């Protein structure tokens, strides 16, 4: 869905991805990240955040927790990070970064609590007093005090993406907070939720009911005498949303697709961030009037923003000139029906015959990437020079793949 936006605002990335694939320097099933564009996007986000008084935790799940990109975002060894799950935390720690926020969507499993607490994250989110007790016991054993955020919930008012609900019910917050505050080894310093901004509205930043719940929770805890320094309001964050988030009462936000230039807002207007990611694969074989392309990276979450009749297209060719000029239609992946996406995406399907899309042809696509739920590789490139520079090919945990150097 972002292919035409890439062609218009960052054609250098498409050229770099195609060129490197044609040279067989990057394999099929690879997300290609433009380090230069991401650096500029992150700088724009940081400048606006500082202007409106917001703190940042950068999300790295969608970029394969890549250390080269993370360093661009937070600096060497930086801690302005958010770990959605333990795999995020493991990758960040393995590559020398500090933990900022962990636990908003996936709480720290019991087996990992000693190691995560020892890593001294800035904040850990908890959904219950039970999880807080686990963290408190370990922090006390280690002789330190761990700051906590309480994730709060009001099912009557809040919006939840599938499988991402949970938290302390707003009606139970006072009693739960009292229980947590009495524990040795932890300190409640804030509240969080997800998502705080709507994803279905692409025209302007619109707070969800979660934001109201978040502010109610802040006031309840402050009224109990707790010092609440963090109102963490993640979701759909970019330069365009930061002032709104700050004015609504947020203190911390978590940019992810914002620094890739691939939020829904970027589809409807030109924002400071430019698109900085694309997907490269290759034609493997043909069945009837379809070309099968190598899959593994097809997690596509754009249907809610598609106009009726929208047709996804891809760039296909055996030379740079042909790739830039030739289009085929993308029909989906895995076992999904036309336009759908199945769970096992060995292949994606595009229109094309052995004549129009020969075996071995390079295919370039543009969609919102989510590396952490795929088997895709990550290639980091620079596009500012006369020739694209490949900095390396990595797996989803940020480990360099040695065959591709």
Image (spheres, rainbow, N blue to C red):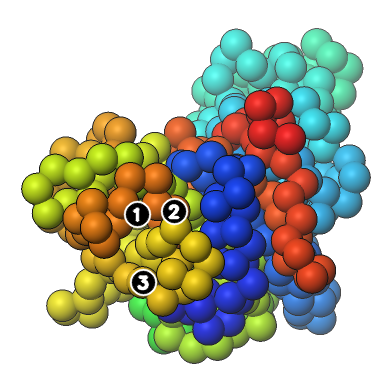
Label 2 crowd (10 A; few <14 / some 14-19 / many >=20) = many
Q: Which mark is residue 48?
A: none
Give the image location of residue 365, x and y in percent: 42, 61
Determine whether the residue tagged by mark 1 lies in a helix, strand or loop.
Answer: loop
Determine whether the residue tagged by mark 3 lies in a helix, strand or loop.
Answer: loop
* Mark 1 → mark 2, Cα distance in angstroms: 20 Å
Determine whether the residue tagged by mark 2 lies in a helix, strand or loop.
Answer: strand
Q: Is residue 385 left or right of residue 177?
A: right
Q: Are marks 1 and 2 in contact (CB under 8 Å)?
A: no
Look at the picture and state if 129 lies above or below 242.
Answer: above
* Mark 2 → mark 3, Cα distance in angstroms: 11 Å
Which is nearer the N-term, disc 1 or disc 2?
A: 1
Q: In this view of the protein, can residue 46 be seen by the observer?
A: no
Q: Which mark is residue 300?
A: 1
Give whichever of 399, 281 is nearer the camera.
281
Give the image location of residue 254, x and y in percent: 64, 58
Label 3 belongs to which residue? Answer: 326
Of tags 1 and 3, the one toward the viewer is 3
Label 2 belongs to which residue? Answer: 362
């Amino acid at each position: 869905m972002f292919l035409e936006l890439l062609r218009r605002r960052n054609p250098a990335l498409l050229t770099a991805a195609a060129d490197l694939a044609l040279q067989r320097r990057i394999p099929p099933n690879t997300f290609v990240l433009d380090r230069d564009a991401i650096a500029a996007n992150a700088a724009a986000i940081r400048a606006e955040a500082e202007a409106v008084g917001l703190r940042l935790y950068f999300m790295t799940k969608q970029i394969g927790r890549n250390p080269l990109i993370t360093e661009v975002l937070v600096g060497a060894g930086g801690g302005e990070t958010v770990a959605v799950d333990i795999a995020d935390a493991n990758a960040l720690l393995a590559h020398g970064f500090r933990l900022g926020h962990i636990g908003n969507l996936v709480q720290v499993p019991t087996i990992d609590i000693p190691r995560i607490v020892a890593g001294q994250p800035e904040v850990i989110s908890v959904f219950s007093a039970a999880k807080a007790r686990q963290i408190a016991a370990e922090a006390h054993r280690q002789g330190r005090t761990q700051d906590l955020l309480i994730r709060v919930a009001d099912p009557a008012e809040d919006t939840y993406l599938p499988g991402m609900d949970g938290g302390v019910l707003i009606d139970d917050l006072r009693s739960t907070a009292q229980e947590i505050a009495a524990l040795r080894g932890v300190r409640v310093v804030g509240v969080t939720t997800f998502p705080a901004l709507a994803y279905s509205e692409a025209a302007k930043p619109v707070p969800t009911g979660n934001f109201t719940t978040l502010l109610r929770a802040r006031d309840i805890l402050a009224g109990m005498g707790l010092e609440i320094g963090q109102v963490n309001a993640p979701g759909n964050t970019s330069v365009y949303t930061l002032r709104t988030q700050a004015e609504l009462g947020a203190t911390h936000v978590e940019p992810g697709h914002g620094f890739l230039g691939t939020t829904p807002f970027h589809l409807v207007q030109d924002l400071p961030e430019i698109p900085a990611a694309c997907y490269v694969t290759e034609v493997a074989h043909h069945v009837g009037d379809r070309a099968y392309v190598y899959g593994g990276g097809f997690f596509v979450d754009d249907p809610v923003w598609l106009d009726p009749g929208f047709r996804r297209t891809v760039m296909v060719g055996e030379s740079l000139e042909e790739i830039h000029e030739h289009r085929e239609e993308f029909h989906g992946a895995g076992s999904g029906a036309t336009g759908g996406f199945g769970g096992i995406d060995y292949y994606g399907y595009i229109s094309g015959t052995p004549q129009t899309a020969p075996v071995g042809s390079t295919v370039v696509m543009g969609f919102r990437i989510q590396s952490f739920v795929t088997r895709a590789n990550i290639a980091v490139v620079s596009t500012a020079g006369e020739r694209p520079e490949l900095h390396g090919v990595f797996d989803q945990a940020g480990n360099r793949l040695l065959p591709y150097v």
